Image (cartoon, helix red, strand yellow):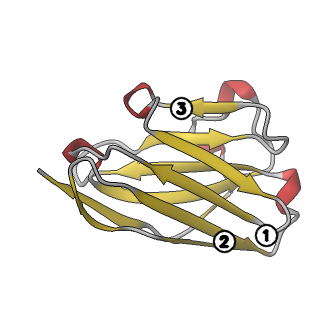
Amino acid sequence: VQLQASGGGSVQTGESLRLSCSTSGFRFEDYAIGWFRQVPGKKREAVLCIDSSGESTYYVDSVKGRFTLSRDNYEKAVYLQMNSLKPEDTALYYCAEGARIITSTIRQGTAYDYWGQGTLVTVSS
């Protein structure tokens, strides 16, 4: 199982980035995918998560209206479109997949089985 996150970078406040998470080694369409972020010294936070059907999603309040998540079952990839970025969005962003995710656990990092390496997003004011 492999997950590869990419697309991070350094941007100014208000700019956009699109993170990609490419996957292999599992039946992508059967798994939930989540984007999490972590700032050194702070707790990991679920940002956007989507279940295997694409019908159930979780957004952390701070990104609602700015971030969108989409999954492409054909390409076996998940994308995180981040608009109107703010300095507080600065973090290491991770994608993760989980086989047994339900609505009540979709934002719990411990419920996910595999994680990709992080991609760094830096937003300067």
Of the image marks 3 and 1, the number of the one nearer the N terminus: 3
Tell me residue 9's x, y (percent): 32, 69
Q: Which mark is residue 52?
A: none
Viewer-nearest of discs 2 and 1? 1
Q: Amino acid at mark 3?
A: Tyr
Does the residue at mark 2 contact the one at mark 1 (Cβ under 8 Å)?
A: yes
Q: Amino acid at mark 1?
A: Glu
Tell me residue 59's x, y (percent): 53, 32
Q: Assign a secondary structure to mark 2.
A: strand
Note whether 33 is above or below 65 in the view shown.
below
- Tag count in the figure? 3
Q: What residue does disc 3 label? A: 59
Does the residue at mark 2 contact the one at mark 3 (Cβ under 8 Å)?
A: no
Of the image marks 2 and 3, the number of the one nearer the N terminus: 2
Note whether 8 is above or below 100 in the view shown.
below
Q: What residue does disc 1 label? A: 75
Q: Amino acid at mark 2?
A: Ser
Instruction: Give the left or right position of residue 20, taking residue 15 as reference.
Output: right
Q: CA distance from mark 2 to mark 1?
A: 8 Å
Q: Residues within 10 Å of mark 3 (few under 14, many from 20)?
A: some
Front-most of 66 and 119? 66
Q: What residue does disc 2 label? A: 22
Does the residue at mark 3 contact the one at mark 1 (Cβ under 8 Å)?
A: no
Q: Residues within 10 Å of mark 2 (few under 14, many from 20)?
A: some
Q: Residues within 10 Å of mark 1 (few under 14, many from 20)?
A: few
Q: Is residue 124 visible?
A: yes
